[in-house]
Amino acid sequence: MPDPRNLASASLPAPDVRMAYWWAGPQDRLPSMSPARPLYHPLFALLDAVRSGGSIKAAAAALGLSYRHVWGELRRWEADLGRPLLDKAQGQRAALTPFAERLLEIERGTQARFAAQIEALSRELGHALVAACND
């Protein structure tokens, strides 16, 4: 396994990225959704919550999930990506690895770059769905 401290030591194959959407009311919004983040992905929500809360327990509470679930998801993502996402020092605040910080940086940049197009698509699709329901 490559040294996780050296992000250039190995490369992952290009991921198969697919977009998804759902039709939901205001009460159904996901915790990490905001006008500044029109796309939701559970990994980035987890990483953001750990960074903001400083612990897995705080992240779980912020996301309305159990500690066990968040811990399991983080471990699954680490296995999938082949790199650690958290610096786990017992008794210390949870800190993201440089790799996880880079993932968040890339995701935020992508969100910012395409926010207007995503919002326009969302509005257009929403209007079309409402029109179809009113026919």
Image (cartoon, helix red, strand yellow):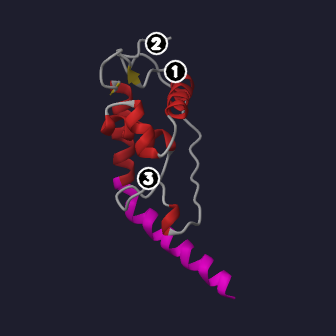
**Labelled disc at residue 82:** 1
Which of labels 2 and 1 is toward the front?
1
In x, y percent, where is residue 112?
34, 54
**Labelled disc at residue 2:** 2
Q: Name the kind of residue labelled 2 in the image.
A: Pro
Q: Residues within 10 Å of mark 2 (few under 14, many from 20)?
A: few
Marks 2/1: CA distance? Answer: 8 Å
Q: Earlier in the sequence, mark 3 or mark 2?
A: 2
| Image side of residue 32 versus residue 65, left or right | left
> In the figure, 38 relative to 52: above or below?
below
Camera-side residue of 130 and 81: 130
Instruction: Check whether the beta carbons of the residues at disc 2 and disc 1 lie within 8 A of each other.
Output: yes
- State the residue position of label 3: 31
The quarter of the image holding the C terminus is bottom right
Marks 1/3: CA distance? Answer: 27 Å
Query: Magenta stretch: dominant SS?
Result: helix
Which of labels 3 and 2 is toward the front?
3
Q: Quadrant of residue 128?
A: bottom right
- Magenta residues span 112-135
Say whether residue 124 is magenta: yes
Q: Earlier in the sequence, mark 1 or mark 3?
A: 3
Q: Residues within 10 Å of mark 3 (few under 14, many from 20)?
A: few
Q: What's the residue at 46%, 18% (across, down)? A: 10
Which of labels 1 and 3 is toward the front?
3
Judged from the image, the secondary structure of the residue bearing numbered disc 1 is loop
In x, y percent, where is residue 91?
32, 17
> In the figure, 56 relative to 88: above or below?
below
Say whether residue 106 is magenta: no
